[in-house]
Image (cartoon, rainbow, N blue to C red):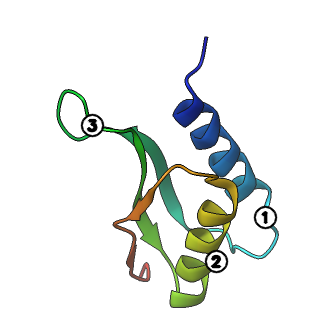
Amino acid sequence: MASAAQKVRDAIDNAIKASDEIKPGNYITVKVEKQGLFGKPFIQLTGRCTSEKDKAKVEEIAQANAGDVKVESSLRVSTVA
């Protein structure tokens, strides 16, 4: 049975993939992390976005789907030459 944090991770990942506001070329990973042995699970966003606008939209989608699960973002903005 999936944990609540895993269900949130799946919801965020699916919402990001389904969004027509985020342009192709973004590489985003949504993971469930936990600090310490008894730490509360949280969602970690990592990867690269092609613009600040896409980064902000990804973070907005994550927060909207997170419920009471904390979301942390390590997304960076870079363009592919």
Determine which quarter of the picture holds residue 31: top left
Find disc 3 in the rendering and name its residue: 39
Question: Which callout, 3 or 1, points at the residue further toward the start of the chain?
Answer: 1
Q: Quadrant of the N terminus?
A: top right
Residue at x 80% of width, y 56% of height: 18
Most extreme residue toward the left, as rendered? 36
Q: Nearer the viewer, residue 73 or 29?
A: 73
Q: What's the residue type where badge 2 is placed? A: Lys
Question: Which callout, 1 or 2, points at the residue further toward the start of the chain?
Answer: 1
Find disc 1 in the rendering and name its residue: 19
Helix, strand or loop under label 2: helix
Q: What's the residue type where badge 3 is placed? A: Gly
Contact, mark 1 vs mark 2 (Cβ under 8 Å):
yes
Find disc 2 in the rendering and name its residue: 57
Per the model, the C-alpha gap separating discs 3 and 2 is 28 Å
Image coordinates of residue 57 in percent, x first then y, are: 64, 77
Residue 80 to residue 71: above or below: below
Helix, strand or loop under label 1: loop
**Pair 3/2: label in front:** 3
